[in-house]
Each structure stands twice: as C-alpha cells, then as structure tokens.
Amino acid sequence: MKIPFRDQLWLQMDTPDNLMYINSLMWFEEIPDWDAITTVIAEKIVDPYPVFRRVSERRGRRWYWVDFPEFDFDAHFSRSTLPGDGGRDEAEKLISERISVPLPAGRPMWSIEYIENYHGHDGPDGQEGALVLFRVQHGLVDGVRLTQLLLSLCEIDDDALPPKVGRDLAPRGGLLRTATEAGAGLVKDSLGIATGLGGAAAVFPLTLTKLVKDVAAPGFQVTRVPTRVVESLTSIVGPTNKTANTYRALFRLLWEPRTPRRSWSGRPGAEKRVSWISGVDLAGVKRVAKAHDSTVTIVMTAAVSRALTEYLRTQGDKPLADINLMIP
C-alpha cells in the first residue's frame, strides 16, 4: 500500500533528537489482567489494521507499507516495575527515559510497556496501580485516529456512549478498494474546491478585502505573504477538504519564518522530560467550553498558551503573536 505524502513526512522527519512519535499513557487504580489487555489490543488494534504489522519500504521514488514477514506480536510488549515508592516522580522519570529512546529499527514502529508498582495517582490509599505506555510512530496513525483506537479498548456503558471522535478508521481492504476510495476522495475534494471558488466569486470583493487585511496584519513580514495568501484563499473551502488542508500545511512548513528567539529557544536534544497533573475539574472545563461555544481541547490549549505567555513575561521576553508549532 502506498504511503500518503503526509505520512511520509512524519517518517522522514524522524531523528534521534526529535522523534516523530505519539506517546500515550494510561493508568489503572489496580493491576489489571495483563493477558486480557494484550488480547484486547490484538483484537481491537493490531488484527484489524494491517499497518501495525507492516514496515515502510522505498521502491524507486515512492514509499510503501509492506507486510513484515518476521512480525512477532509479543516482541512489541514489555513489562517493568517502578523503583522505590512508585510515586509520580519515579513514574515521570521512567516515562521520560522511555520516550527519549528510538523504537527498534527494522520492524513495525510501535511498542507497549506494562508498568507496575504505581502509587502516584489519586486512587485508594496504599493500593498498587499500574501504567500502560503506548508508543507509535506518527506515520502509522495520527492523533485523532489513535484516540479512536484507545477508546475502542474500553467497554462503554450503553447509556454513556461518548461522542464520535474524528472520522471512521479505514477497515481492512484490498488495493482496489484503497485506490477506489482515494480516487473518490480526490474527486470529492475537487468538487469542494470548485464549489468554494464558485461561491467565492459572488463575494470576491469581500474575499479580496479579507486577503489584504490578512497580508497587512499586525506583525507583517514579507516572508509571511505566501502563507497568508494561501490561508485566505483556502478559507473558502470546507474545513474537512483533505487536498486543500494538505497544501495549506505544506505552505506553512515551507514559507513560515523562524519564530523569534526567546528564553525557550534552543536546539532539541535526545533527552526528553514529561510531567502530568491530576485533580483538574473536568466539569468546570466543560462549563467554560460550553459558555464560549468551544471544546475541552481548545480550553485546555488556551490555558497552556496563557501559561507560556506568563513564562515569557517572567523571563523578560516580549510576547509573541504566533509560533510556528506547539503541541501541548
């Protein structure tokens, strides 16, 4: 199966000091039946989606997902125990060490580690919990689809069905089905672009006015002109148009200028650090999101943005209107 260009980018950008991985951490208030969890992972993730049993291979100028003949399901799993009291400090140190190390080369790029002796969560006092660290290369799956997969591992009460997350995952299918769906998607995107352009013609003066305002926005830089033009023109197309979104993302990567140097500037290193908090009032976050017709993700991202702004202020830095990339 041909690897989409956007996924090739994740694979090619992967370096030891800046791994293109998605690291997911789950925890349990008590040690679960690991064999049962392993079975669920096989049934819900690895068996239905062949990409978890494949490796990338270059053929001429193109890259493909090909079956890994020596695939060993059990080799992707490991088990460990937190040292000492197994508190949050010990857990954060261990996870930081793990996510700093590249996955083994020459096999499907994902791993799962079961970690016991965890006492750092808000569970019953003295009760031993556990962690599950799931690491996967971003080229195999994006964040939304991985969220879908992780949610599929859980048993959900009929009266507590969560809202749908993202698009449906592509089921197992042959080359003909993949090509047919890809062609249909391109036709649909093209019709969407044509429709958007047709609608834009009727309001061209307004579109042109918006374009001029975008290009001449505060903090204007000549090198930002191509990006602002593309942003304005693609805004007339539906937000789910994959073709338009791909071109928009490419222009951002190619034309965006470097972020001005601040106290956090520097080169990425191989060593990474991770931390987390608990006790956040999720109900309160949801109320804020509802009051502003927004989402939990946007509210939390805004909180992180505010924290970063305060950090810059305490360091004596000037505030930033934009940053090129930030993953909270």
Image (tube, rainbow, N blue to C red):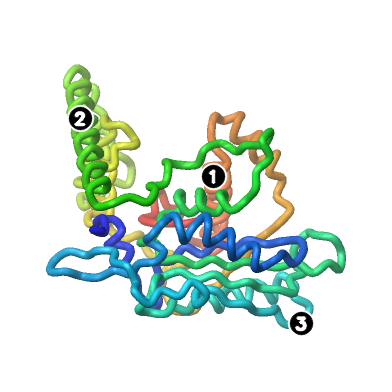
Q: Secondary structure at mark 2?
A: helix
Identify the amino acid type marked 1: Thr
43 displayed left or right of 61: right
- The residue singled out by tag 3 in the image is 84
* In-front residue for pair 81/177: 177
Marked residue nearer the N-terminal end (1 or 3): 3
Identify the amino acid type marked 3: Gly
The residue depicted at 75 percent of the width and 74 percent of the height is 117
Q: Secondary structure at mark 3?
A: loop
The residue depicted at 27 percent of the width and 40 percent of the height is 231
The residue depicted at 54 percent of the width and 76 percent of the height is 98
Quadrant where the N terminus is found in the figure: bottom left
The reply to whether the C-beta atoms of the residues labelled 2 and 3 are less than 8 Å apart is no
- The residue singled out by tag 1 in the image is 297
Q: Residue 318 is drawn in which quadrant?
A: bottom left
Q: Measuring from the top left, give residue 172's x and y in whole percent.
A: 37, 51
Q: CA distance from mark 2 to mark 1?
A: 31 Å
Identify the amino acid type marked 2: Leu
Q: Residues within 10 Å of mark 2 (few under 14, many from 20)?
A: few
Q: CA distance from mark 2 to mark 3?
A: 60 Å
Please indicate, yes or no, whether residue 216 appears anywhere in the rendered image: no
